[in-house]
Image (cartoon, rainbow, N blue to C red):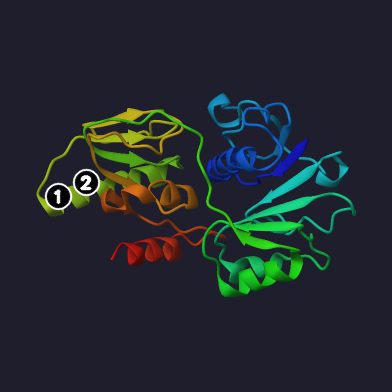
Amino acid sequence: MIVCYASGDGLGHLTRLRSFLHTLSRTDPFPSGRLDGLVTVVTGSRFSEDPRVTGGWDVVEAADLAEFEADEVIVDAFPAGIKGELTRFPSGMRLTHLARLLRWDAYEPLLPADPPRFDRTFVLEPLDPAHEAYLRDVSDEVVPLVLTDPPSEPIDVDGWLIVHSGPALETLELVAYVHDMASAEGVAPPMTLVSPHRPDDLPPGVTHLDVYPAYTPGPNVERIITAAGFNAVRQYAPWRDRHRMLPFPRSLDDQFARAARARRETR
């Protein structure tokens, strides 16, 4: 059994976890397709009951990870849990960490006195130097990993594609940003919003689709507009020339730093 800690109420942790497990199934001794029924995910995400997101997994809202008889425990994003609630695990339990960018100055004070130690940490994107130094202190092995997403059908719509999982106020702000962009450029492209929920007050003329996963644009998509979360920036990297980002403030994620790095890399 693989037990995964994916705390957070959004979609990002679960999407990253599905990509990681797909990558894992190609490299570790779990033949592709055999992870179904072997994965238990601990999460409070509002998307935990969506079979497109968590299909094939056992999902629990809260649990003591150390009580599972697991072959491996995977801790996503927060090395000691989202509130610093995870401490050292019993010896003999294989522990893996998935590291993505954190606002380390905000997260570091949450670390407990006896934090988890990891057999391996996979670094999924560049980190704050102090964050990476900490992970090297608490990990036997720290290595970079490029995630591979499960195959998905492309979303082929005309014009501009807006992708965001919410909350609704952010989605509307992103749509307003897109309208401002179009106005500044003197264009009026068709616009399609891909989001789990159609927000109230969505402007007329914006088509809404509930599609998951949503990371492969079809040939008729002229532009892609998202926030600057880990998954969006990573998954749309092959289409960086068409991708525009509006970073949003997060308590522990630094979307602004991620967006700035992505823009530098395209110059």
Q: Residues within 10 Å of mark 1 (few under 14, many from 20)?
A: few
Residue 21: tell me if it is visible.
yes
In the image, is 258 to the left or to the right of 22?
left
Residue pointed to by mark 2: 179
Q: Quadrant of residue 214?
A: top left
Which quarter of the figure is the N terminus placed in?
top right
Helix, strand or loop for disc 2:
helix
Q: Mark 2 belongs to which amino acid? A: His
Residue pointed to by mark 1: 183
Relative to residue 49, is residue 122 depicted above or below?
A: below
Q: Where does residue 98 sit, x and y in percent of width and height?
A: 64, 53
In the image, is 80 to the left or to the right of 234?
right
Relative to residue 266, is residue 12 depicted above or below?
A: above
Front residue (pair 66, 120): 120
Which quarter of the figure is the C terminus placed in?
bottom left
Q: Residues within 10 Å of mark 2 (few under 14, many from 20)?
A: some
Relative to residue 116, is residue 25 depicted above or below?
A: above
Front residue (pair 235, 62): 235
Number of residue marks: 2
